[in-house]
């Protein structure tokens, strides 16, 4: 089966298609899109149309057919349209009897009102469409050109942002867009509405930034940062492999996440992201991450991830490559872009990668490769005690990637780094874009292009459940990893007079949340003070040392004041009150830092690691 993800806009101009989707938005206020799917040049007694069960990049079976309204089928023969019999073959596919007609039409509505980067969201203000959740494919005809015709009020919704290519200029007939095949269509989300758009050229390609936000956004500032991201990432691979790329940014409360595509990415952040420096840095790292995926996972990809089976799980142990490598690079690229200073980058590695991984007991229970393989029922169906069961392949995969980069730099005296490995993988993609990588081939290419035998070490880290050998890998670059108790920040007032000493926050291993004056337990880490005290998920913490607890901040203060002393906990499980005692521990943090004195080799390798292009 051939697989093609590359498309240039000029390839679709003026084309015709025998598979078309007319999308109507007259019921947008009820969160519905009306789909008329027309299949022409039909041969054979039946046509089978299938709604995908999942969307690539988000490894969860979502059964999009569940959002689809009743299907009506018609055939057209000699210009006469008649209702056609059909049967459901399974939960997601319908088989239509053609009765010798050469055109088949399917009519259905799709309900979309879930605001994520991988689900439809339609209302009176806009439509964000995920093609796998909206457009069925025709079995046996996925390789053909597909057209999408948008029928919306072009005055109310003047902007359409998508990697799909324009077939003809917009007219009364609607906005006609096309894809060379269904895989490209499936990969092409659409934002339709009155969002802000900026276009600019960089690296010889057209870029669009589309921002859907109900709050004011400094889009020109953002476009300026994206220009830097494009140049910095293109510097690794030599150039950009597309004629046009679309950054879709959606701002809505409490969101953070993204989804990668071949010529676009969808990024979702809280509107606060552009008002606070620390959150803005998170947004820039997210943009770096999703954009990096256009190389790593959309093109350089595990053999299981393209071509896809859209009807069921596509298992791969290689999400360490897809997401682990990308997680390491997103912050590294933020640093290379100049969004982080060197100290800020080391702090980010310490707090967001090393400390977070230290708090995952599941890293001793499941390997990163297995966590990848089982992502469909682990990371994407996270149970509240997930952290005790497995490590995320993003988090541990990212730390493993950092160690791999340091290992390569050390073993070549700085002549190569993981960047060279990526370039090797990229050259392999250019030689044969239709075929993904087996793990074996991927590692062979990394070895060849960096000149380092790394297979055994890498597989040990990816298959292992013991602690990673940090000290051994950090030392050659003059780095040391300290795990130390967090101390209370010194507080001063007036002219540097020290404030009454405020004790440091304590570690319980409990994740807690406040709900109408109650403190509820949402997670309990294995081996932690909370677990030893016998506290369970969903229990309510009622009182500490006899004082009623009404909020998490107050709880932290009581525990901080108690310090090492045992605390009497009054809690409630399922309506039954119980008492227990808990001895909390200091909060431990991983801190990666430069050694005070470095040899010249250490300094040279460290500088090599963090050199900016
Ligand atoms: Zn990712």
Image (spheres, rainbow, N blue to C red):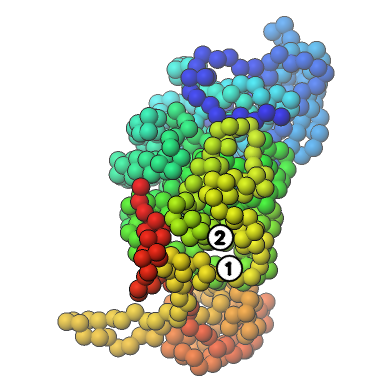
Q: Is residue 412 above or below residue 140?
A: below
Residue highlighted by disc 2 = 400
Can residue 162 be seen by looking at this rendering? no
Residue 429 falls in image quadrant: top right
Residue beneath the point at 34% across and 53% down: 339
Q: Report helix, strand or loop for mark 1.
A: loop
Label 2 neighbourhood size at 10 Å, few (<14), some (14-19), many (20+)? many
Quadrant placement of the N terminus: top right
| Residue 423 x %, y % | 50, 42
Q: Is residue 217 above or below residue 96?
A: below
User: In the rendering, which numbered label is found on residue 468?
Assistant: 1
Looking at the image, residue 169 lies above or below residue 255: above
Question: Residue 282's spot in the image, x, y percent?
Answer: 41, 55
Looking at the rendering, which quadrant does residue 161 occupy? top left
Q: Residue at x 43, y 89 (%)?
A: 561
Query: For the view shown, which residue lies furthest in the left direction?
Result: 495
Please identify the quarter of the rendering in which residue 308 is found.
top right
């Amino acid at each position: 089966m051939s697989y093609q993800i590359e498309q240039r806009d000029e390839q679709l101009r003026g084309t015709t298609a025998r598979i078309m989707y007319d999308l109507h938005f007259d019921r947008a206020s009820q969160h519905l899109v009306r789909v008329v799917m027309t299949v022409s040049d039909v041969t054979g007694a039946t046509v089978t149309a299938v709604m995908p069960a999942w969307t690539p990049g988000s490894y969860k079976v979502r059964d999009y057919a569940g959002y689809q309204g009743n299907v009506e089928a018609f055939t057209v023969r000699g210009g006469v349209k008649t209702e056609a019999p059909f049967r459901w073959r399974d939960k997601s596919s319908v088989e239509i009897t053609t009765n010798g007609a050469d055109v088949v039409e399917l009519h259905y509505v799709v309900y979309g009102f879930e605001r994520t980067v991988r689900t439809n969201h339609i209302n009176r203000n806009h439509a964000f469409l995920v093609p796998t959740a909206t457009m069925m494919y025709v079995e046996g005809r996925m390789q053909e050109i597909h057209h999408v015709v948008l029928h919306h009020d072009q005055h109310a919704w003047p902007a359409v942002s998508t990697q799909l290519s324009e077939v003809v200029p917009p007219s009364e007939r609607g906005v006609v867009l096309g894809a060379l095949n269904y895989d490209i269509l499936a990969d092409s989300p659409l934002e339709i509405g009155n969002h802000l758009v900026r276009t600019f050229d960089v690296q010889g390609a057209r870029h669009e930034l589309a921002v859907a936000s109900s709050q004011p956004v400094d889009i020109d500032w953002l476009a300026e940062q994206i220009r830097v991201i494009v140049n910095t990432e293109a510097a690794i691979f030599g150039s950009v492999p597309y004629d046009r790329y679309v950054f879709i940014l959606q701002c809505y409360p409490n969101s953070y996440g993204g989804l990668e595509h071949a010529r676009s990415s969808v990024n979702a952040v809280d509107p606060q992201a552009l008002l606070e420096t620390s959150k803005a840095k998170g947004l820039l790292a997210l943009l770096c991450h999703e954009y990096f995926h256009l190389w790593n996972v959309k093109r350089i990809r595990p053999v299981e991830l393209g071509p896809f089976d859209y009807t069921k799980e596509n298992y791969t142990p290689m999400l360490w490559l897809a997401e682990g490598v990308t997680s390491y690079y997103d912050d590294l690229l933020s640093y290379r872009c100049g969004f982080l200073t060197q100290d800020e980058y080391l702090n980010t590695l310490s707090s967001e990668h090393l400390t977070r991984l230290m708090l995952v007991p599941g890293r001793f229970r499941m390997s990163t490769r297995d966590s990848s393989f089982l992502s469909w029922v682990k990371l994407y169906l996270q149970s509240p005690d997930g952290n005790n069961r497995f490590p995320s392949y993003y988090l541990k995969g990212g730390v493993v990637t950092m160690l791999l980069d340091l290992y390569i730099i050390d073993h070549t005296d700085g002549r190569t780094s993981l960047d060279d490995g990526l370039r090797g993988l990229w050259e392999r993609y250019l030689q044969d874009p239709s075929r993904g990588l087996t793990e074996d081939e991927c590692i062979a290419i990394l070895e060849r292009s960096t000149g380092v035998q790394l297979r055994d070490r890498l597989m040990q880290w990816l298959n292992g459940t013991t602690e990673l050998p940090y000290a051994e890998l950090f030392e050659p670059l003059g780095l040391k990893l300290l795990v130390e108790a967090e101390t209370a920040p010194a507080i001063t007032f007036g002219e540097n007079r020290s404030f009454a000493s405020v004790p440091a926050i304590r570690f319980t291993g409990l994740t807690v949340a406040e709900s109408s004056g109650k403190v509820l337990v949402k997670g309990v880490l294995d081996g932690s003070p909370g677990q030893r005290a016998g506290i369970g998920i969903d229990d309510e913490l009622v009182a500490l040392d006899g004082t009623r607890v009404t909020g998490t901040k107050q709880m932290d203060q009581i525990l901080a004041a108690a310090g090492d002393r045992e605390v009497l906990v009054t809690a409630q499980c399922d309506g039954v009150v119980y008492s227990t005692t808990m001895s909390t521990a200091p909060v431990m943090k991983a801190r990666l830092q430069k050694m005070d004195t470095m040899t010249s080799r250490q300094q040279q390798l460290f500088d090599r690691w963090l050199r900016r292009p």
